[in-house]
Structure formats: structure tokens, C-alpha cells
Amino acid sequence: MNDLFARHRQVLPDWLALYYDEPLEITHGEGRHVWDADGNRYLDFFGGILTTMTAHALPEVTKAVSEQAGRIIHSSTLYLNRPMVELAERIAQLSGIPDARVFFTTSGTEANDTALLLATTYRRTNTILAMRNSYHGRSFSSVGITGNKGWSPTSLSPLQTLYVHGGVRTRGPFAELNDRDFIAACVDDLRDLLGHTRAPAALIAEPIQGVGGFTSPPDGLYAAFRKVLQEQGILWIADEVQTGWGRTGEHFWGWQAHGQSGPPDILTFAKGIGNGSSIGGVVARSEIMNCLDSNSISTFGGTQITMAAGLANLSYLLEHDLQGNARRVGGLLIERLRAVAAQLPGVREVRGRGLMIGIELVKPGTDEADPKSASAVLEAAREGGLLIGKGGGHNTSALRIAPPLSLTVAEAEEGAAILEQALRSAY
Ligand code: PMP
């Protein structure tokens, strides 16, 4: 065990998830690559969903952050904050939500907490609908609604939560159904739940589940849910923490694959928008955002330095059409991985959109989840110089691929070749 790992084990909580038998210390990065403390270089196929939306050490963001750090970092809300207003204007416009107001937080957890605060206050009930296998953060309320029990370390909750089917397409009681029948069965399930409870405040859902393994619900599922919800005035909170900012290629937001019934009532975002600076946030119609009757500020939510990072990063994303890049390069990568998967009995499915790609592993010849092989592939990929992620329900048997959105075709091919080797070594 290396010295830093030993020290980590002494002072940090046991429940902090660490990848790899010999955990990695990443010391620097550039573009789509990172380096460890021993000088080994890795192609980063996971950092895009964690922190790095566009590219590691993007000079435009570094410049904006260091200039702002040299100027002022002060209260984000007690005085007028130009970068916060500018970023809010851009996000309000991009969100698709009419008459939108934006509130900045420091994380996805705090964004979802705020969304729950708004929805429950607006609707005057603390009952929430959430999806099975979902993940929404680590505060008391977001843990309380998280459907993925591997990430829900307490069964206590300030909210009453009812879980809905539909987030996972490949497993569960409706897995054999075609898309239309699947949606109909999920809508029946939702109606059944609603028949047994006072109208909940909101349904919170990730358009594609992230921690849950980059699942792929059929397009239109949430539009069908929406019709039922709207009959009772129940809000839809789209948790876009992983699916936002063009990652899925075809759409700027994940909700747009379900957009027939309009934008969500509340949208939450976080992760890579600051390219490593901690920005989260909530967008909602002003009527919902303004339902709180007293002050509710966040000291660090929207500080000038994080807003400067967000503005520079978002400009880069839009000016370089990284959404289009995600569609093109992600499309090639999915095709390439599907061709490999067709030869390997342990790969049940390659699913995804744009640069959000999941690979579901099973014990060959069965339908049983295969978390051991998922860990083995992760280790083998690292040996080959590629970082990927894992996810899924209790048995984390899905591999997750989410590179920075500026991934090139050559890098996609290089990563696919390493991954192919890693998959072959596990099966
Ligand atoms: N929602 C989703 C969909 C997430 O994936 C995450 C983080 N994995 C969160 C919320 C929580 O975000 P944070 O870790 O920034 O609190």
C-alpha cells in the first residue's frame, strides 16, 4: 500500500469510494489526458462526467479563474455579482424553461436539496416520487429519495418517497416489453402509486440515470409521465447533473428526449459546468422559484471565481460545438464498442447517447450481473492507460464511459482499442 493510501485510510471515512486495488493519485491533466504521481499517462474516459466537461486544464478557464482570483472573491449574493448575473442569463435562456430564474449552489446535492425545498414548499406536501435505481446526492433529503440503495446509507428520511419504475430499461419486470408497451406499463405503475397517496409534490428523475449505470429509458417516457403528473399539478424535476450541457449529443439537455410535453418545471445541474470549479444550480419558473417566504442564500454558491469558470467553460463549449462533437465522436465510439460486444458473451448491452456510454456486463450465458468482471475490466483498462467508471444497482456491473466533450476521433479509437483488450482479458 503506498504511503498516501495508508494516510488516507487513517484520516478519511471508510465509506469514501475509491477506485482500484492500488488507488490512483492524479497529479495533473491536459486535454483528455491525466498523469499519475508516478508519471504514467492515461486517457480519461470518465473525468468528463465528474468535473471536466470540456478538457483538462483548459487555458481559457485557467485564465478566467486566475484573473478573477486576482481581482475579487466576495459574497456571492449580498452585493451585485456581475459574473453571476451573466451566467444566470445564459443558463436561463438555454434551459428552455419560460420565465426562468436560476439559483446557484456549490454541488449537485445542494441543487437537488433546493429543488426539493422549492417543490415541497410550493405544493405544501413532503411526498416525493423518485425513480428506482436513481441517485440524487448525499444530503439527508437527497439520500432519502435516492432509489439506488447502494448509495443510500440511511433508511431515515425527512421526505416520504414513492419509487416509480422506468429508469432502467434492461432489467426489472417490464424488461421484455417493446418501448411502447414499456412506457404504458410504467405509466400504469405511476397511476397505481398515485391512486394510493395524496398528490405528491414532484417527480424527480435523471433523464438517463448516471450512477445507476447510464441506463436508457425509451424516448418519450417522461413526456408520458408528465401528462399524468400534470392532471394533479405534480411538478417534474429533471436532474440534469450528468445529462446536461450537450453530453448526450442529440440534445443539449436530457429532458429534450422527452420534450413533447414541454420543459421540466425545475431543472438541476452541477458537475462539469465549472470544469472543476464547484458550480451547481437550480432553474425554475419564477412562480416556483419565488415561493420561499424568507431569505435562503448560499455563501459559496455563485462566487465570482466559480462563475468566471462557468462562463469561460460554457463559451468554449458553445463556440466549439462540443455537443455536435459528442454526437459525432460518441456515435463512432458506440458503433465500435457494439462491434466488440457482439463477439463477447459477457457483454449484455452497449447503450448510450453521445459521450455517455454504458456497457452492461453479465456472467456469460446468464442474465446475472457480473460486478467482479466489471472491476477486472476497470483494472485492466487502467493497466492499458485508460480510465473508465463503474455503475449500476447493488451489483455495479455496468462500465461507464464519459470523456471530456472535446474527445477526438483518434482518442476515441485509442480508448476503444484499450477497452477491447481489457474486456477480452476479463472474458
Ligand atoms: N445528481 C446526479 C444525477 C448525480 O450524478 C450526482 C453526483 N454523482 C448528484 C446529483 C450529486 O452531485 P454532487 O456530487 O455534486 O453533490
Image: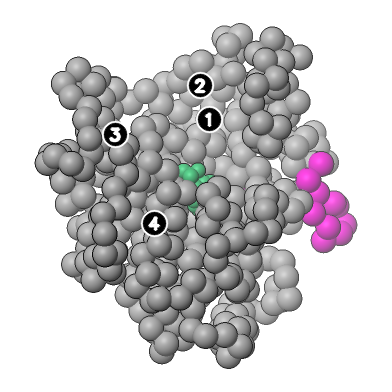
Q: Which residue is mark 4?
A: 114
Please state which of the two labelled residues, at mark 4 or mark 3, is closer to the viewer. Answer: 4
Estimate how packed mark 1 is, as few (under 14), some (14 to 19) or many (20 or more) residues with alpha carbons within 10 Å.
many
Q: Position of residue 404 (x, y in %)?
A: 44, 36
Please state which of the two labelled residues, at mark 3 or mark 2, is closer to the viewer. Answer: 3
Of the residues shown, which amino acid type is indicated by label 3?
Thr
Q: Residue at x 49, y 78 (%)?
A: 200
Q: Which residue is mark 1?
A: 44
For the residues bearing labels 3 and 2, Cβ distance under 8 angstroms = no
State the CA–CA distance, disc 1 to disc 2.
Answer: 7 Å
Of the image marks 2 and 4, the number of the one nearer the N terminus: 2
For the residues bearing labels 1 and 3, Cβ distance under 8 angstroms = no
Badge 4 element: helix
In the rendered image of this protein, does residue 77 appear above or below residue 189? above
Magenta stretch: helix, strand or loop mostly: loop
In the picture, measured across the screen, residue 294 lies left or right of residue 333, that is left
The segment highlighted magenta reads: 358-372
Of the residues shown, which amino acid type is indicated by label 2?
Val
Of the image marks 3 and 2, the number of the one nearer the N terminus: 2
Please state which of the two labelled residues, at mark 1 or mark 3, is closer to the viewer. Answer: 3
Of the image marks 4 and 3, the number of the one nearer the N terminus: 4
Estimate how packed mark 4 is, as few (under 14), some (14 to 19) or many (20 or more) residues with alpha carbons within 10 Å.
many
State the CA–CA distance, disc 3 to disc 2.
Answer: 22 Å
In the picture, measured across the screen, residue 33 lies left or right of residue 274, that is right
In the rendered image of this protein, does residue 256 appear above or below residue 275? below
Label placed on residue 34: 2
Q: Which residue is mark 3?
A: 306
Disc 1, ligand 1: is the CB inside 8 Å? no
